[in-house]
Amino acid sequence: MTTVRIGMVKYINTAPIYEEWKTRAIPADWQVTDAPPSTLNRLLADNRIDLGYVSSHEYAVRPERYRMLADLSISATGPVGSVFLFSSLPPDELTDKPVLLTGQSQTSVALVKIVLEEFIGVQPRYQVGEIFADGECAKNVSAVLAIGDEALRLDAEGMHPYRLDLADVWHKETGLPFVFAVFAVREEFVREHPATLRKVWQTLIDCRDRGRERLPEISRLVAPRIPMDADDCCEYLRKIEHHLSPAHQKGLELFFTYLVRRNEAPTSALPLKFFP
């Protein structure tokens, strides 16, 4: 048997897949690590996992190393509800103002810079750090970029007068979905274990489809982690898209085009490469 090292994002945005996965009789040699996207990025880049959900930015900056598993993503068409810029100032007044960026997602950091610099036309002063310190949101900054469960918590607290849902801004500007994460696999693993990889991929697709059918039940299970109301959690999870349609691929290609133009990714990020 082939040992497969799999990375799962530990935020609730993967719950429709991951909670269903946990109910399955998964082979013992399919080993799962759950962690924030930034950690999974490093693990995949360092050959410590074979495949996993990583920031789409991670795929873009190292395209020669990876392929994407077909029809799997973490995406949104319009508001996503968990990737926000929370600001004490109107966003068009953030030039030269300090903006704190989460260190948990390269994709969201790249996206907020595109939104602020390319779409809104401001040039803030960025710093990377912890959004929460001693249980409170960071102070002494004009705005914070928060993602995942931290963003859900800040949104529920309602402490900031301005907030931008970055996927919503992207959709309004481009008309396309935004792909936050892809399920990437190392090229070596594709070459050496294609049959095993296909079984893992088919299981993931099946878990996604079944998990989407169980959203109310799964929402009741994971909502206390935030904490948030189970119905609100279900509404949030319905906004999260876990497929990778042609429209999603166009959105991903446009994001990568911005990254290449901004010298954040090589030209070889395009065209996109898939398995199977």
Image: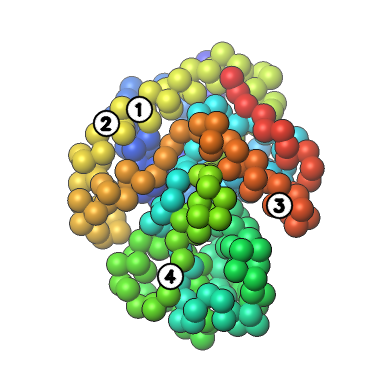
Distance from label 2 to label 4 (Cα)? 31 Å
Answer with mark 3 or mark 2, whichever residue precedes in sequence: 2
Residue at left offset 20%, top offset 51%: 231
The residue that label 2 is drawn on is 213
The residue that label 1 is drawn on is 209
Q: Position of residue 102 (x, y in %)?
A: 53, 65
The residue that label 3 is drawn on is 259
Distance from label 3 to label 2 (Cα)? 35 Å
User: Where residue 163 is drawn, which disc sits there?
Assistant: 4
In the picture provided, is 39 more to the left or to the right than 205? right
User: Disc 2, disc 1: CB below 8 Å?
Assistant: yes
Distance from label 2 to label 1 (Cα)? 7 Å
Residue at left offset 53%, top offset 82%: 141
- In the rendered structure, which amino acid carries the disc numbered 2? Glu
Q: Position of residue 73 (x, y in %)?
A: 50, 38
Q: Is residue 191 above or below residue 116?
A: above
